[in-house]
Amino acid sequence: MENQWSYTQCIAAYSTSFRYEDLTPQAVFTAKNIVLDTLGALFAAWPDRHPVSRLIGDFVQQMGGTPECTVLGGNFKAPAANAALANGTMGYAADIEGAGIARMHAAAVFVPTALVMGERQKLDGKTLIAALALAYDVAARVSEASRTEHSYPHSFHPSAVFGTFGAAVITGYALKLDAPRFVNTCGLAGNVASGLIAWVDDPTEHSRSYGIGVAARNGVTAGLLAERGFGGPQGIFDPMKYNIFDAFSGTMHLEELTRDLGSEFYIERADGFKQYPCCGDIHSGIDALLGIMSEHNLHPNEIVQITHKVKATRRPVIDNNPLRSHCAQYIMAIAAIEREIRWDDFLHDRRDEPAISEMTRRIHLMEAPELSDSPGAAPAIVEVKTSRGQLLSKRVDFAKGRSENPLSQAELEAKFVRWAAPVVGEARALEIIAAVQRLEELTDICELIALMHEPPN
């Protein structure tokens, strides 16, 4: 008789036997770049820069507990699950992290979790890389098994729901759990997986990143409980009664859970790195607008109207969204005026500045049927009417930074320095780059975490 929980046990067996030596050179290279880019995102969201990081850090410090793992930017340690809550929240706060996969802001959950568990278990660099790659594999497969034609079926946020599994897998791997405990880890993670995308109506943007922190915390908690013998659902990846697929998508494609398992690594498919701290659906529009302005030496005062055309599926996400980081009209206005997007542009509303307010009114977002067949997930056509009577147009199918139009290694490292140097100085930022480049050689990941502290004056 076929095993009732075949998919779950297959994932557990795969996870417990996973090894760094199984990875391809490309997977290792990508993992290191994901770590570097996410460390930059954490610096961009340092507590003295982003209020949500300060608030969550203060909360975790107030809860107290065994000082196991570093709360970044807080100069204190907390129990592993609580440190994961704080650092995971920071990971998504600046909305500048990249390397998404299968509808998830995966790196924002997985890298903070890997650092927390790496510190707690004193993991070496190879083990951390393997744990990160495994998280991408398992969480992406569960997400793909739940995929529907709708971006956010049942109003849940894939990054939070499926991110919980990735955090749980990292924890189980760091703890060297056996297969039965791995089954419990995943079951417990699925039992509490949660996260609505209701944060799109929260102008503070606190709840947007909080859901990522909760995913990291819940994944760590699941692994730590399973290590103690705590039981969980046995078939979380199978068509059990009240299963996760019913809860979050209403459909399931179980073949995606094991397709090419062990011979193809999802981390190699990670979807590039962001240039701008805002929703990725706006990036192609920014690129098109800045391209037009540069190519035609266009001054903001010469812009009469900007028409920003997007796929029909993307418009609801970015059309006059209350979140400034997800509002195309606001972000495009800043791009037109400043020719860049800074880390703090969505922390306060700049529409009280006359130039930004006026430019926002000149921007119109609309659906473009001609983009429906674009190979890009979030392409854009931007048309600019000028005071000279010109109509200038540019189409961008893949924003700079996406895997199809990637940042160079030098550009990726320059991006990291841009976010890290204001916190720790350029010299320390370059030290961190060097440490990540030799991550597989580190005998204790705490060497890297120590560099994240601000150096003494």
Image (cartoon, rainbow, N blue to C red):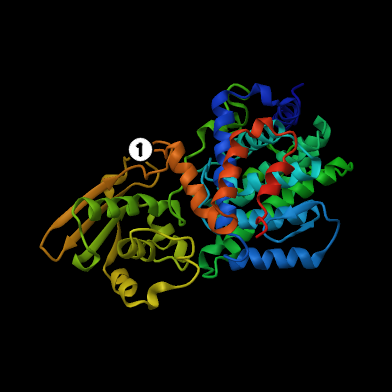
Q: Report the amino acid beneath label 1.
A: Pro
Determine which residue is flagged by label 1.
375
Instruction: Establish if 22 lies above or below 405.
Output: above
Q: Tell me the residue at 55%/65% (across/down).
A: 205
Q: Tell me the residue at 69%/47% (across/down).
A: 449
Residue placed furthest toward the right: 229
Residue 1, horizontal then vertical, whole percent? 77, 21
Instruction: Establish if 301 lies above or below 439.
Output: below
Judge whether residue 193 can be spotted in this image. no
Residue 106 image-quadrant placement:
top right
Q: Secondary structure at mark 1?
A: loop
**Does 219 sit left or right of 374 as displayed?**
right
Residue placed furthest toward the front: 457
Residue 211 image-quadrant placement:
bottom right
Tally of numbered tags: 1
Residue 121, horizontal then vertical, whole percent? 80, 41
Residue 356, horizontal then vertical, whole percent? 34, 71
- Looking at the rendered image, the quarter that the C terminus falls into is bottom right
Label 1 crowd (10 A; few <14 / some 14-19 / many >=20): few
Instruction: Establish if 25 lies above or below 455.
Output: above
Q: Tell me the residue at 45%/65% (across/down).
A: 345
Residue 176 image-quadrant placement:
top right
